Amino acid sequence: MSYHCHTIIDIGTPPTGGLTLFNVYVALSRSRGQDNIRLLRGFDEKLLMTHPCEYLRIENERL
């Protein structure tokens, strides 16, 4: 019999209203691989497509 550890993640907006890419990264990085992640509910995928910091994006383009 095989036992697997699954990570259940809720990426919904918290009561404080502030959900950032860093929050999502920390939650997802706690798992040992994508096969073990279970999302509790859907989330706005645009969050993953936005740069976490406009200043860093501009500086990265400059370099």
Image (spheres, helix red, strand yellow):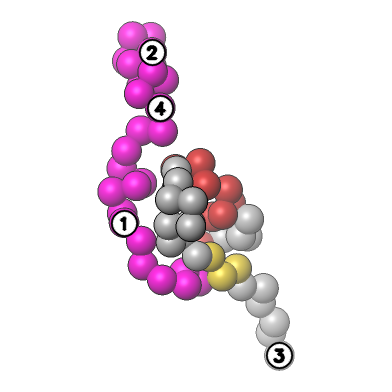
Q: Amino acid at mark 1?
A: Asp
Looking at the picture, how far across and down is residue 53, in whole percent?
A: 40, 27
Secondary structure under the numbered disc 2 in the rendered image: helix
Between the C-alphas of marks 2 and 1, the distance is 26 Å
Based on the displayed image, in which of its 4 quarters is residue 43 positioned?
Answer: bottom left
Query: Is residue 45 in the magenta section?
Result: yes
Checking the image for residue 1, the label placed there is 3
37 relative to 58 in the view: left or right: right
Q: Residue at x 31, y 54 (%)?
A: 45
Q: Is residue 49 above or below residue 42?
A: above
Based on the displayed image, in which of its 4 quarters is residue 59 positioned?
Answer: top left
Q: Amino acid at mark 4?
A: Cys
Looking at the picture, how far across and down is residue 3, in whole percent?
A: 70, 82
Q: Residue at x 36, y 67 (%)?
A: 42
Residue marked by disc 4: 53
Mark sitting earlier along the chain (1/3): 3
Between the C-alphas of marks 2 and 4, the distance is 10 Å
Q: Quadrant of the C terminus?
A: top left
| Magenta highlight range | 38-63
Mark sitting earlier along the chain (1/4): 1
Residue marked by disc 1: 44
Residue marked by disc 2: 59
Secondary structure under the numbered disc 1 in the rendered image: loop
Between the C-alphas of marks 3 and 4, the distance is 46 Å
Q: Outermost residue toward the bottom?
A: 1
Q: Amino acid at mark 3?
A: Met
Q: Residues within 10 Å of mark 4 (few under 14, many from 20)?
A: few
